[in-house]
Image (cartoon, helix red, strand yellow):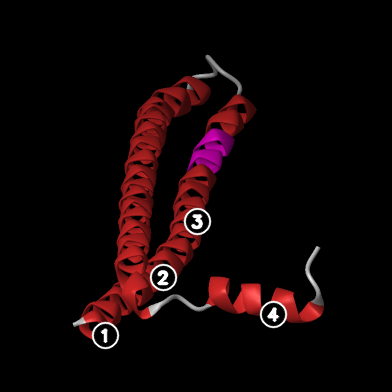
């Protein structure tokens, strides 16, 4: 167990790197910079993946909506000739509206996800820049 004075002496030795210890700090900052760079790549990949997912989902919605729209004239003719109840067509109109709502939902969800990831991206980018600046400072201070 340390006395208060001994603790302060030990803490000072641990907290303050010696002038010759810049190599270890440079290595640590370089490693941190590499980790942050990897995080940036992962976050960028997440954004691209989210856009691809949105595009795939919108293509599916478009295909479904096209099938509904293609069936509408046929259903209207059937209702006109009393081969089908006119009120049955309401289900197809409702499905068309739901698909349009799904389209909007996909776009909004994508924007929200990308905005969230971009906030993280900017935080990591800022930390990466700070680590790079510190590393450069240590390189010049050690010279």
Which quadrant is home to the C terminus? bottom left
Q: Residues within 10 Å of mark 2 (few under 14, many from 20)?
A: some
Q: Position of residue 33 (x, y in %)?
A: 32, 62
Viewer-nearest of labels 2 and 4?
4
User: According to the image, label 2 marks what residue?
Assistant: 127
Q: CA distance from mark 3 to mark 4?
A: 55 Å
Q: Is residue 2 above or below residue 32?
A: below
For the residues labelled 2 and 4, the Cα–Cα distance comes to 30 Å
Q: Nearer the viewer, residue 102 or 42?
A: 42
Report if residue 98 lies within the magenta region: yes
Q: CA distance from mark 1 to mark 2?
A: 21 Å
What x and y, as percent, mark residue 74? 40, 23
Describe the element under mark 3 as helix, strand or loop. Answer: helix
Residue marked by disc 4: 8
Q: Which stretch did the figure color magenta?
A: 93-99
In the picture of the structure, the residue carrying the numbered disc 1 is: 141
Earlier in the chain: of badge 3 and badge 2, it is 3
Sequence order check, earlier mark of 3 and 1: 3
The reply, left or right, for residue 93 in relation to residue 19 is right
Distance Cα–Cα, label 3 vs label 2? 29 Å
Label drawn at residue 108: 3
Vertical side of 118 occupied by 75: above or below: above
């Amino acid at each position: 167990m340390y006395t208060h004075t001994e603790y302060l002496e030990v803490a000072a030795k641990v907290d303050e790197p010696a002038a010759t210890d810049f190599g270890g700090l440079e290595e640590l900052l370089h490693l941190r910079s590499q980790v942050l760079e990897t995080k940036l790549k992962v976050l960028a990949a997440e954004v691209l993946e989210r856009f691809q997912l949105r595009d795939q989902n919108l293509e599916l919605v478009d295909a479904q909506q096209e099938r509904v729209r293609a069936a509408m004239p046929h259903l209207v003719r059937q209702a006109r000739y009393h081969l089908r109840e006119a009120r049955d067509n309401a289900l197809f109109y409702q499905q068309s509206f739901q698909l349009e709502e799904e389209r909007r939902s996909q776009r909004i969800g994508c924007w929200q996800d990308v905005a969230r990831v971009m906030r993280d991206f900017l935080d990591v980018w800022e930390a990466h820049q700070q680590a790079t600046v510190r590393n450069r400072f240590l390189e010049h201070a050690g010279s």
